[in-house]
Image (tube, rainbow, N blue to C red):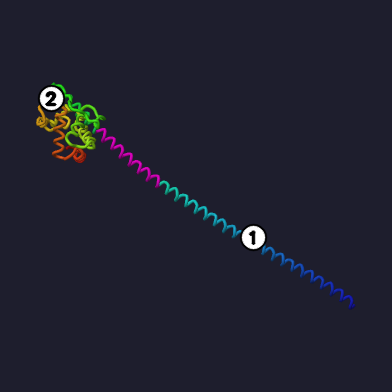
Amino acid sequence: MNRLWSRVGIRVASVGLLVAGVIGGVYLGQDQEVQAQSAQATLVVQADAEEMQLLKERHGQHAAARAYQREAEDEAATKAAAEAKVAAGKARTVEKKLIEKKAAEKKAAEGKKDDVGGSGATVPFPGPIPDSCNDFSGNRATGCALMLKAGFKIAQFPCLDKLWKKESGWNHRASNSSSGAYGIPQALPGSKMGSEGSDWKTNPATQIEWGLGYIKGRYGSPCSAWSHSQNVGWY
């Protein structure tokens, strides 16, 4: 009888241990599953954080690219405005020169039509032309020679050349029908040049000598006269 109970007790103990093992295995499995889920959640959170960081970096790159593009566009606009300003200045300069050229041509044409000097032939210049004036011809060469004779330096001739090119185109018969100005220096009236000679209507040298005397007495030099003409439009 005792042996029977002993066997039953052993079997019961064995079954208890088996049940305990099963229950322990269940709890162990559940714990491993919980741990696995926790690890997976950690990985998901980490992946989300990395993705957010990547998005922030890309957003920063896009913002920097847009800022660079705006800066480049502003720089290009500033450069284009500066180039347009320079081009406009050049256009005004060309237009001014064209107007001056047309005005000189008009005066020259008027001089041919309104010849107050009658039909007298042009008096040629009998004097010598210095070597420093060899680059010029006609009335300009005469003007260069007489300017040096009047005591001015050769450096003054570019100013005299521009001044009388503007006034008459160096045409000794140039006449302004509205004002009465006449000749290379556009004396007003032309009869003033009679103080240098009675042939003032047809002799370029007489006109030039009078013009040089007028410039010397009023402005001191051809360059001073040219500067005044640029500032106010006349001399």
- Circle 2: is it few (<14), some (14-19), or many (20+) Cα within 10 Å? many
Q: Name the amino acid type tagged 2.
A: Gly
Which element carries disc 1, helix, strand or loop?
helix
Q: Nearer the viewer, residue 105 or 144?
A: 144
Instruction: Find disc 2 in the rendering and name its residue.
Output: 117
Where's residue 107, x and y in %? Answer: 19, 29
Q: Quadrant of the N terminus?
A: bottom right
Q: Name the amino acid type tagged 1.
A: Gln
Q: Earlier in the sequence, mark 2 or mark 1?
A: 1
Q: Residue at x 68, y 63 (%)?
A: 33
Furthest residue in direction bottom, as rendered: 2
Mainly helix, strand or loop, the magenta region?
Answer: helix
Is 100 above or below relative to 13?
above
Q: Nearer the viewer, residue 87 or 194?
A: 194
Disc nearest the viewer among 2 and 1: 2
Instruction: Find disc 1 in the rendering and name its residue.
Output: 40
Q: Quadrant of residue 158?
A: top left
Which element carries disc 2, helix, strand or loop?
loop
Q: Are marks 2 and 1 in contact (CB under 8 Å)?
A: no
Is 169 above or below relative to 226?
above
The span picked out in magenta is 74-99
Is 64 above or below relative to 100?
below
Q: Quadrant of residue 178?
A: top left
Q: Residue at x 41, y 46 (%)?
A: 73
Position of 235 with respect to 61 (left or right) is: left
Where's residue 205, x and y in %? Answer: 16, 29
Position of 31 with respect to 154 (left or right) is: right
Q: Nearer the viewer, residue 136 or 229?
A: 136
Where's residue 152, x and y in %? Answer: 19, 37
Where's residue 75, x and y in %? Answer: 40, 47
Q: Is residue 89 visible?
A: yes
